[in-house]
Image: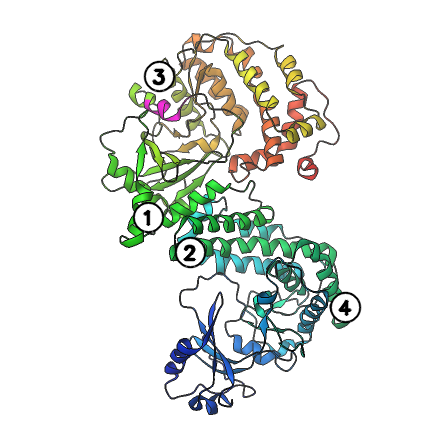
């Protein structure tokens, strides 16, 4: 523990021994019995003759020397920095807690609590004896008896009202963001983004904390798990709680929640523990159980949400200490479990699958591996790659540049990592290449309902070779790296300062941007699509588009189909009948982007106005469809829509635009209906909910559903509300 500037209480403490105290700590590390902890290295050792008088203990008496770990990550919320002040305040109220015998810079000496940790006789996941549960409940309740005026001063951010439960939980959430997430973000932020955890996840959680019942604040241990509970050998005293450095002062429900989660009780024992706690607390402070049934879930959600940060970081750091495939498998499982528990409170959407987690951890580790020994072997494995011969590598981006990009990828900070619906993108600068590049990894477990038709790298190379005025990335490399991880490398389009995110027109296009996009759609008509799709133009585009949508609906999971029927959406056969009533005129085909949503458009300061990215949904077909789908996916004011249609009709030859006035509403119908099914499926499955375009679509689902059923001429059911899907599944 760090030394305090406050005068030390006389009761129960002694000044640090003057003769060679560093020698004493070294002796503890050498001859003491080591008991590892997350934040301290603890050594149990007998008092030597030289230390007996300064410590006030007889020779041979056991003491615990606690030495703060120098390499410990900041992964906990601390209300007070000095554990000794806490122990001094509670010793008169809570019996048997350790006594502070001496302290100095980075260490402390405590009286030794005889006994055995509960974890050594009853491991995590095992049920705890009912009598012991009752004793633990009384231990938690007894903390309410500690007087507030004896505790150290609280930080200025603390709620002023000592019964403000909502304020306390919001304060905890902000502290978790400030003390745990923020200081670790430079080293781990890229990994968290790759795993689907955005930078503001905790802040958004704080905003969602509801009003709760008022409960009187009390002292909380805040870390009461099996390692911190000492049982006596003879059973002549109740369990003793040690390790008070994370203690705090606030809503007692927080202590119950952390105890429930960190004790790893089996699920069936949760009600027993809650009932025992409520009974013990009613005897001491009845108001502390106000709103227990309603509010405990909010503290459980917070505990699971904030735990994802230390759990992921510890798993990643463990790979630095010892990397083997078995250890990587274990770390992957630990991270998966933490993500699954945090997914609901942090609203993460779908949890990354095993392969995605494993690859993210491996890339993070490889980017930090040293140049010698095991590190050299790891780097050699990580940065070797097998080229995909379908893409000829350009002369200005050789094999060495690819290896450099792979080496830098795992160390990219969070501000340069972007996760979409199907790809993880990491932006890096490669020596010798004049522009930043983006390493694109296809997410292994991501299944996109809308199928790709053309290969993205082939489309980008066709645009590049056509020398048309279309602002699109260059495809630089395509291949596979360890472990069977497919990637592509493109030029990066965005701000020159790659520390700032790209600027997307999420609220719609400005007039000059609308003009620039139409001009680029016109330029796409000059790209030779024959090598991309030799059969283009031989089939009716609308009929093909309709058949693809019907097939998509038919292949939805049964849960999604069942809920769609409940909400009034037709099944695949009925949808086919309805859409087959419509026809559109044949127009000359051209290369289409296929997914011109705002996040696939990047603002730029030149005549192009916008760069078009993410071409994986490109296809060959009716150019009117690309324009209409863009207007469906992007907020488009009527005046901008009219401006784009007028410019489009004026700039493109008539064989691309004829009869557009009567046909554009048919394509609009198709896109409205498509969104109704796809967004519903995302709500049911949780797929891609962390992507901003998906989140916005899901949030407006009630309007999408009403528009779809209305356009199809079907009645809207009264049960169709924006959150019904979540409630039903």
Tell me the residue that label 3 is attached to: 527
Q: CA distance from mark 1 to mark 3?
A: 43 Å
Label 4, label 2: how many angstroms apart (C-alpha)? Answer: 43 Å
Q: Nearer the viewer, mark 2 or mark 3?
A: 2
Q: Quadrant of the C terminus?
A: top right
**3D distance between C-alphas at marks 2 and 1:** 15 Å
Per the image, the residue denoted by label 4 is 282
Do residues under tags 3 and 4 come within 8 Å of each other at their CB atoms?
no
Discs 4, 2 touching: Cβ within 8 Å: no
225 vs 605: above or below: below
| Residue 6 seen by the camera | yes
Label 1 CA crowd tier, 10 Å (few <14, some 14–19, many 20+): many
User: Tag 1, which secondary structure?
Assistant: helix
Residue behind mark 1: 378
Q: Which is more foreground, mark 2 or mark 1?
A: 1
Q: CA distance from mark 3 to mark 4?
A: 76 Å
């Amino acid at each position: 523990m760090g030394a305090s500037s406050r005068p030390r209480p006389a009761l129960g403490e002694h000044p640090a021994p003057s003769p060679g105290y560093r020698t004493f700590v070294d002796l503890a590390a050498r001859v003491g019995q080591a008991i590892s902890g997350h934040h301290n290295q603890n050594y149990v050792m007998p008092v030597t003759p030289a230390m007996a008088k300064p410590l006030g203990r007889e020779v041979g008496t056991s003491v615990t020397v606690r030495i703060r770990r120098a390499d410990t990550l900041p992964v906990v919320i601390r209300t007070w920095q000095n554990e000794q002040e806490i122990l001094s305040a509670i010793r008169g109220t809570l019996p048997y807690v350790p006594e502070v015998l001496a302290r100095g810079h980075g260490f402390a000496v405590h009286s030794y609590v005889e006994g055995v940790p509960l974890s050594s006789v009853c491991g995590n996941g095992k049920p705890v004896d009912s009598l012991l549960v009752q004793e633990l409940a009384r231990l938690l309740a007894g903390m309410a008896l500690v007087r507030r005026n004896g505790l150290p001063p609280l930080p200025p951010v603390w709620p002023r009202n000592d019964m403000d439960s909502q304020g306390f939980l919001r304060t905890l959430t902000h502290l978790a963001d400030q003390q745990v997430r923020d200081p670790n973000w430079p080293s781990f932020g890229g990994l968290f983004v790759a795993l689907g955890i955005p930078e503001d996840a905790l802040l958004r959680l704080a905003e969602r904390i509801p009003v709760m019942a008022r409960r009187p604040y009390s002292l909380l241990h805040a870390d009461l798990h099996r390692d911190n509970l000492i049982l006596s050998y003879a059973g002549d005293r109740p369990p003793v709680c040690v390790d008070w450095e994370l203690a705090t002062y606030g809503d007692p429900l927080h202590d119950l929640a952390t105890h429930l989660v960190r004790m790893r009780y089996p699920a069936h024992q949760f009600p027993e523990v809650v009932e025992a706690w409520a009974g013990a607390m009613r005897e001491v402070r009845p108001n502390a159980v106000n709103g227990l049934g309603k509010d405990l879930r909010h503290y459980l959600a917070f505990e699971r949400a904030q735990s994802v940060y230390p759990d992921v970081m510890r798993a990643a750091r463990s790979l630095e200490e010892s990397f083997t495939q078995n250890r990587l498998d274990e770390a992957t499982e630990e991270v998966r479990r933490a993500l699954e528990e945090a997914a609901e409170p942090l609203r993460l959407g779908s949890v990354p699958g095993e392969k995605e987690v494993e690859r993210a951890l491996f890339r993070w580790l490889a980017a930090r591996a040293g140049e010698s020994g095991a590190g050299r072997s790891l780097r050699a494995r990580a940065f070797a790659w097998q080229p995909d011969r379908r893409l000829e590598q350009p002369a200005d981006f050789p094999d060495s540049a690819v290896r450099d990009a792979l080496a830098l990828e795992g160390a990219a900070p969070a501000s340069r990592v972007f996760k979409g619906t199907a790809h993880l993108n990491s932006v890096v600068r490669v020596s010798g290449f004049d522009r930043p590049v983006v390493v694109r990894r296809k997410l292994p477990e991501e299944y996109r309902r809308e199928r790709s038709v053309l290969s993205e790298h082939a489309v980008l190379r066709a645009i590049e070779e056509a020398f048309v005025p279309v602002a699109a990335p260059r495809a630089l490399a395509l291949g596979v790296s360890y472990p069977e991880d497919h990637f592509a490398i493109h030029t990066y389009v965005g701000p020159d300062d790659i520390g700032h995110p790209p600027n997307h027109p999420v609220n719609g296009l400005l007039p000059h941007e609308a003009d620039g996009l139409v001009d680029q759609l016109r330029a796409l008509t000059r790209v030779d699509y024959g090598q991309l799709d030799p059969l283009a133009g031989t089939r009716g585009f609308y009929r093909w588009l309709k058949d693809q949508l019907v097939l998509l609906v038919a292949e939805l999971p049964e849960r999604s189909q069942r809920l769609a029927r409940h909400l009034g959406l037709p099944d695949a056969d009925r949808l086919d009948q309805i859409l087959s009533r419509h026809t559109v005129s044949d127009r000359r085909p051209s290369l289409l982007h296929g997914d011109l949503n705002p996040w696939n458009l990047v603002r730029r300061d030149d005549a192009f106005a916008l760069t078009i990215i993410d071409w994986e949904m490109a296809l060959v077909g009716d150019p009117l469809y690309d324009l209409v789908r863009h207007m469906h996916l992007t907020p488009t004011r009527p005046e901008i829509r009219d401006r784009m249609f007028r410019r489009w009709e004026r700039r493109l030859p008539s064989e691309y635009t004829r009869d557009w006035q009567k046909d554009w509403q048919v394509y609009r119908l198709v896109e409205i209906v498509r969104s109704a099914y796809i967004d519903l499926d995302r709500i049911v499955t949780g797929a891609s909910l962390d992507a901003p375009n998906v989140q916005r679509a899901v949030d407006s689902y009630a309007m999408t559903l009403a528009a779809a059923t209305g356009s199809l001429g079907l009645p809207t059911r009264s049960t169709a509300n924006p959150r019904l899907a979540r409630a039903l599944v």
